């Protein structure tokens, strides 16, 4: 991996706990529907076409980098496509979100799932990473690779799409614990190799998304049915030489158990103030977050007040001996976010934190 | 209110912290689609027809009471109908859940909302309560009245239905705090009077449902935009002479703030074990909950293991000087729940806790 980038990128330095001239910022789902450039591409191509065409995925990845002074890019993809090569028929239905037409309904469905290599399964994304890093490395901007955590992927594979109750997923884990174990282990294998290949292709950081674990599970179920697999997966990534961000949603109530899974940087959703989360989990790692994405729908005075709150809390942690802060949202950017608010946010975080 | 019922009903005794011969049990959404008798009625009548026809609402309320040995009935209705008289056009669309065709989109929409009396707005439900209590009081079974908490109702009124991000609701509270205050105060007025009239009609306990607050809001927003109104509402109910249950979902991470709002009994969702919640919030009130509704989809050995876990934790709290336990789910019963599991659950809780 690129030595100069490691030394000079504020984002990568902060990930390793080193000092930076200002607080680095990137935004989850920064390449997305709120940008007119993105909507123009999506008017011509489906979600899976953009992800499956390296040139398009690279172009979309670069759109927010060229529009705003962000400190890191994240490869344009989605958490779900790795399921396709495992045997799932996935589609992004218009206005309905992702649909899986052949969800898991029995242990036998788990037994037949394949564990394809990333080259076979996600070759277009790996190619897009090579295109993007060829462009960004000379500009001294790192690229984040990512994948969905096993539980979040399993929930889509069992429910056949989004869910409010996760009842099928939980019924499978409760009634067929061996099939659940097999499913989670297959996902660990597929995702570990996929993340590893993203680094080989040029990604200089990784993020694991466990977006739904905390909305679906209480602490006892998390510890029994999720934590062991996330721990395995982080262990598989430990020798890659790039920082790994451990992001999860809705897990604030058992945050120490989430942090214990691993990762070099802890992503914090918007439900818990940074300093409270930090103290609760006794975090000794850099923290990333955690502006509520809804704040970006408001006028600048309200938005700035909320950004200041995040910055003040991060400074408080730092003053108390805590590690550096990477500014981000607590969840993905909303499609109806005004572009000007994003521009202003990025500039403001840099200015307000310049040391 | 009926003195004999107050003295002899295990549910009402537990609500007041008194000893009982066994742990009382009722189930959120116990009258619902999992029962063939219920589906037979709904095949002939829409949701709003059943709610709006006292005889039908009473019949549906009594179905689970006649099928199982439950310790309390809850009047059949929904949290949303009180919005109709305030000026909202509400429909329960087939397979899509509730839809509000004229959601709030500006402060002006809040200003024109009415605050009708319960007699005018929810007369059919009040009449159903009179029918049900005439039947149940001689059988020594109490009836629970209920209403949605202001935030949960406001979220539907602003989003126009269910939501995953609550972004419109939060944008309103952030950008128009005065309109938010006006909306929440109007909801407090309407709901306080509605709950009061339910007691006048015969309800011998009340439950306030803040089902979505914890999924939508972080602790800072909860304290600023929700807690004051829930506190007002509980204060309005304090002189009614019936126990009030404070139930909320997804609020485990700021449970002390939720408990501080008021109520005589604390409802605990399935995300946090009973004893952990109890300790976290320093609860000195009876607690209700908190079996994960998904457990009812499993076979009896798995289900019993999970029921035992709840009972053991409740006993632990009791042994440590805590107040009595009312068995319930941590959220509403799921439509695909086997009826036999419900029967077995009710019997088992009574047998296992017989003192």
Image: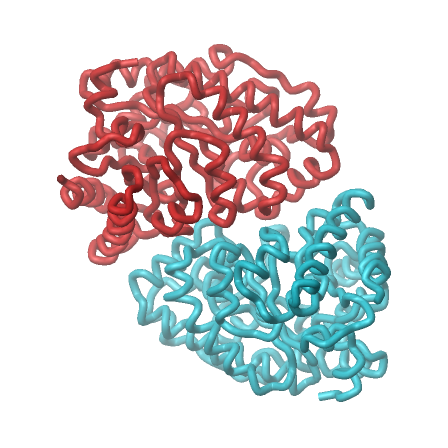
Chain colours: A cyan, B red
Q: Nearer the viewer, residue A92 or B213?
A: B213
Name the residue at the front extreme.
A320
The answer to whether residue B216 is seen in the rendering is yes
The image quarter containing residue A56 is bottom right
Relative to A120, residue B192 above or below: above
Relative to A76, residue B245 above or below: above
The image quarter containing residue A220 is bottom left
x and y percent of residue B205 in the render?
35, 24
The answer to whether residue B96 is seen in the rendering is no
How many marks the image carries: the answer is: 0
- Residue at 48% in and 52% down: A163
Q: Quadrant of the N terminus of chain B?
A: top left
x and y percent of residue A313 in the render?
69, 55
Relative to residue A325, is residue B146 drawn left or right? left
Relative to residue A70, is residue A263 drawn left or right? left
Relative to B240, residue A269 above or below: below
The image quarter containing residue A72 is bottom right
Q: Nearer the viewer, residue A346 or B22?
A: B22
Q: Quadrant of the C terminus of chain B?
A: top left
Q: Nearer the viewer, residue A102 or B271?
A: B271
x and y percent of residue B61 in the render?
31, 26
Relative to residue B249, is residue B101 drawn left or right? right
- Residue at 60% in and 86% down: A240
Relative to residue A92, is residue A189 drawn left or right? left
x and y percent of residue A298 in the render?
76, 43
- Residue at 49% in and 63% down: A256
- Residue at 65% in and 69% down: A286
């Amino acid at each position: 991996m690129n030595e100069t980038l490691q030394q000079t990128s504020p984002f990568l330095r902060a990930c390793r706990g080193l000092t930076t001239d200002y607080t680095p910022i990137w935004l989850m789902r920064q390449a997305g529907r709120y940008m007119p450039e993105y909507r123009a591409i999506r008017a011509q191509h489906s979600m899976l076409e953009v992800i499956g065409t390296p040139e398009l995925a690279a172009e979309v990845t670069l759109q927010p980098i060229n529009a705003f002074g962000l400190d890191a890019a994240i490869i344009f993809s989605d958490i779900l496509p790795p399921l396709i090569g495992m045997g799932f028929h996935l589609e992004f239905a218009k206005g309905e979100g992702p649909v899986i037409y052949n969800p898991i309904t029995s242990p036998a469905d788990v037994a037949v799932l394949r564990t394809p290599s990333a080259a076979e399964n996600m070759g277009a994304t790996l190619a897009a990473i090579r295109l993007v890093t060829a462009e960004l490395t000379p500009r001294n901007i790192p690229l984040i690779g990512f994948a969905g955590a096993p539980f979040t992927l399993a929930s889509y594979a069992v429910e056949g799409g989004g869910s409010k109750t996760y009842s099928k997923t939980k019924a499978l884990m409760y009634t067929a614990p061996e099939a659940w174990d097999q499913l989670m282990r297959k996902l660990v294998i597929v995702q570990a190799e996929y993340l590893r290949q993203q680094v080989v292709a040029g990604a200089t950081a990784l993020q694991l998304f466990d977006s739904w674990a905390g909305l679906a599970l209480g602490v006892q179920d998390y510890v029994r049915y999720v934590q062991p697999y996330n721990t395995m997966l982080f262990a598989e990534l430990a020798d890659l030489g790039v920082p790994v961000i451990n992001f999860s949603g809705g897990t604030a109530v058992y945050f120490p158990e989430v942090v214990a899974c691993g990762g070099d940087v802890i992503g914090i959703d918007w439900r818990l103030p940074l300093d409270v989360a930090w103290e609760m989990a006794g975090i000794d790692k850099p923290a990333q977050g955690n502006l509520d994405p809804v704040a970006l729908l408001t006028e600048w005075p309200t938005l700035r007040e909320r950004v200041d709150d995040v910055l003040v809390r991060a400074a408080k942690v730092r003053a108390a001996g805590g590690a550096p802060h990477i500014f981000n949202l607590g969840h993905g950017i909303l499609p109806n976010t005004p572009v000007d608010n994003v521009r202003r946010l990025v500039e403001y975080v840099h200015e307000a934190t310049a040391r």
